[in-house]
């Protein structure tokens, strides 16, 4: 019996079948896992790209509520139907930084595809559901802090997997967040020039006051 077992151990016939029966299921499972992981990465990439697209487009047209999401507009902010000359102070959460919340709250958020109240809600409402991937939902918010104005988009999409595959990854939804800063170079230049002008005027007035005091 021992001799038979030793002889059987030295033979190589049937080894390929045994190896194939062991390795093939492992390779198949690994291949399926990689395919599922690729789908998750693809969904995440598409959702992240759309979140960035929505945030950048809304931030780009933030200086005029009459602008379309593609930048086209026919009404300026100073026109009769425009946002008004002082919308940055009264309707852009500027005063709320100093504890004055008469015109608007400090933080605004709406569901993509709907429009909120006030000028901020109207601007956030420009993000339509047509920009979202099929089956996804999300919110868009605006925050005006002391040093920056930011548009934040949060998207969520169900994972297109059967229940057993979802348990494998431990997630049911794919989520993506993206932010874009509202920048207005021309307004920044105008504000800087205005501050420089006022600073020069104040400096001249102080010099006149000093001269007047010295004469006394």
Image (cartoon, helix red, strand yellow):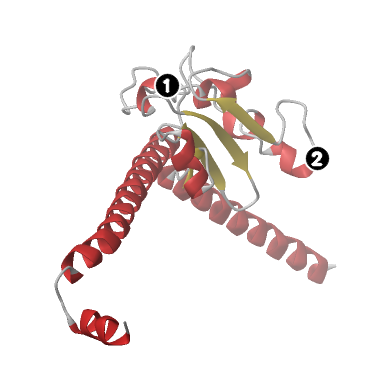
| Image quarter (top left, top right, bottom left or bottom right) of the C terminus | bottom right
In 3D space, how far apart are the residues under numbered discs 1 and 2 (Cα atoms)?
32 Å
Q: Position of residue 215 (x, y in %)?
A: 80, 69
According to the image, label 2 marks what residue? 99
In the picture, the disc for residue 203 is none
Is disc 1 in contact with disc 2, using a CB cutoff of under 8 Å? Answer: no
Q: Residue furthest right?
A: 216
| Image quarter (top left, top right, bottom left or bottom right) of the N terminus | bottom left
Name the quadrant containing residue 84.
Answer: top right
Q: Position of residue 111 (x, y in %)?
A: 56, 24
Q: Is residue 127 above or below residue 179?
A: above
- In the image, 13 versus 193, the foreground residue is 13
Q: Residue furthest top?
A: 80
Q: Is residue 16 left or right of residue 141?
A: left
Q: Position of residue 75 (x, y in %)?
A: 39, 17
The residue shown at (66%, 39%) is 94
Precedes in sequence: disc 1 or disc 2: 2
Mark 2 burial class by Cα count in 10 Å: few <14, some 14-19, many 20+: few
The residue shown at (35%, 51%) is 33
User: Which secondary structure lies at badge 2?
Assistant: loop
User: Which secondary structure lies at badge 1?
Assistant: loop
Residue 174 visible in image: no
Name the quadrant containing residue 2.
Answer: bottom left
The residue shown at (64%, 31%) is 108
- In the image, 195 versus 145, the foreground residue is 145
According to the image, label 1 marks what residue? 128
- In the image, 114 versus 74, the foreground residue is 114
Q: Is residue 157 above or below residue 194?
A: above
Q: Position of residue 126 (x, y in %)?
A: 45, 23
Mark 1 burial class by Cα count in 10 Å: few <14, some 14-19, many 20+: some
Residue 137 visible in image: yes
Q: Is residue 148 left or right of residue 43?
A: right
């Amino acid at each position: 019996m021992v001799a038979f077992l030793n002889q059987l151990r030295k033979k190589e016939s049937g080894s390929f079948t045994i190896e194939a029966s062991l390795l093939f299921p492992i390779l198949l499972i690994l291949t399926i896992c990689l395919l599922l992981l690729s789908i998750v990465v693809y969904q995440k990439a598409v959702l992240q790209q759309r979140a960035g697209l929505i945030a950048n487009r809304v931030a780009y047209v933030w200086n005029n509520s009459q602008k379309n999401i593609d930048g086209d507009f026919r009404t300026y902010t100073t026109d009769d139907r425009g946002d008004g000359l002082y919308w940055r102070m009264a309707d852009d959460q500027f005063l709320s930084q100093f504890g004055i919340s008469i015109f608007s709250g400090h933080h605004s958020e709406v569901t993509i595809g709907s429009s909120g109240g006030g000028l901020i809600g109207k601007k956030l409402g420009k993000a339509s559901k047509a920009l979202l991937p099929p089956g996804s939902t999300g919110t868009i918010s605006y925050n005006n802090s002391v040093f920056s104005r930011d548009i934040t988009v949060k998207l969520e999409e169900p994972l297109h997997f059967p229940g057993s595959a979802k348990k494998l990854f431990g997630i049911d939804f794919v989520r993506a967040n993206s932010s874009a800063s509202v920048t207005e170079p021309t307004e920044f230049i105008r504000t800087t020039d205005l501050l420089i002008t006022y600073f020069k005027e104040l400096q001249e007035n102080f010099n006149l006051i000093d001269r007047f005091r010295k004469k006394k």
